[in-house]
Image (tube, rainbow, N blue to C red):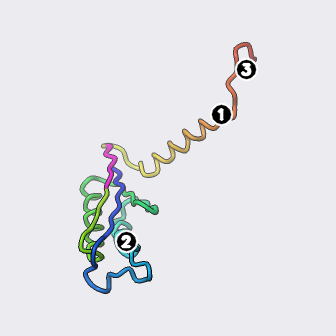
């Protein structure tokens, strides 16, 4: 399964060590870094973008990492928001990259069809 999730704190941090650390008091980058460190340490295939982290594995191992990521963010606020989307496809692995490879292949095929016109009736070919 692949899980895409986003976790962020809100409210007051537990202590001064968990403040954003710069002039942008609305920034959550330190909290997100704590969550991403948990994901990276898990050893599971993963990818992080500006909005979400994707992680691939079996249900229990992925959900344990998500729980640990939420725990890592907890000291940064009095509450934590978690957004999670899962693609549950038993028997399939390597889909974190496989889905993108199939997408790129489909885009290339579509582009080739747009560039190369189909033969018309009566045309040799």
Tag 3 residue: 125
For label 1, count other residues whose C-alpha is less than 10 Å away and answer few (under 14), some (14-19) or many (20+): few
Total marks in image: 3
Residue highlighted by disc 1:
114
Residue 96: image location, x then y, percent = 42, 52
- Disc on the earlier residue, 3 or 1: 1
Residue depth check, mark 3 versus mark 1: number of the one nearer the observer: 1
Instruction: Identify which residue, 121 or 39, lies in the foreground.
Output: 121
The secondary structure that dominates the magenta segment is strand
Q: Looking at the picture, how far across and down is residue 120, in whole percent?
A: 70, 18
Residue 63's disc number:
none
Tell me, yes or no, whether the two marked residues, 2 and 1, touch with CB atoms within 8 Å. no
Q: Which residue matches tag 2?
A: 37
Range shown magenta:
84-89
Q: Give the residue drawn at x 37%, y 57%.
A: 55
Q: Is residue 110 left or right of residue 24?
A: right
Question: Residue 26 in the image: x percent, y percent?
Answer: 39, 74
Q: Earlier in the sequence, mark 3 or mark 2?
A: 2
Q: CA distance from mark 3 to mark 2?
A: 57 Å
Above or below, 5 against 9 in this view is: above
Marks 3 and 2: CB-CB under 8 Å? no
Q: Element type at marker 3?
A: loop
**Residue depicted at 34% across the width and 82% down the height:** 19
Q: CA distance from mark 2 to mark 1?
A: 44 Å
């Amino acid at each position: 399964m692949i899980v895409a999730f986003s976790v962020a704190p809100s409210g007051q941090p537990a202590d001064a060590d968990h403040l954003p650390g710069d002039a942008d008091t609305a920034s959550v980058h330190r909290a997100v870094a704590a969550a991403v460190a948990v994901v990276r340490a898990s050893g599971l295939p993963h990818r992080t973008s500006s909005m979400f982290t994707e992680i691939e594995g079996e249900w229990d191992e992925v959900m344990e990492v998500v729980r640990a990521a939420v725990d890592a963010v907890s000291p940064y606020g009095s509450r934590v928001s978690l957004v999670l989307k899962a693609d549950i496809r038993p028997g399939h692995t390597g889909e974190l990259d496989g889905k993108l490879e199939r997408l790129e292949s489909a885009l290339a095929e579509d582009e080739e069809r747009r560039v190369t016109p189909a033969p018309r009736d009566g045309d040799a070919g």
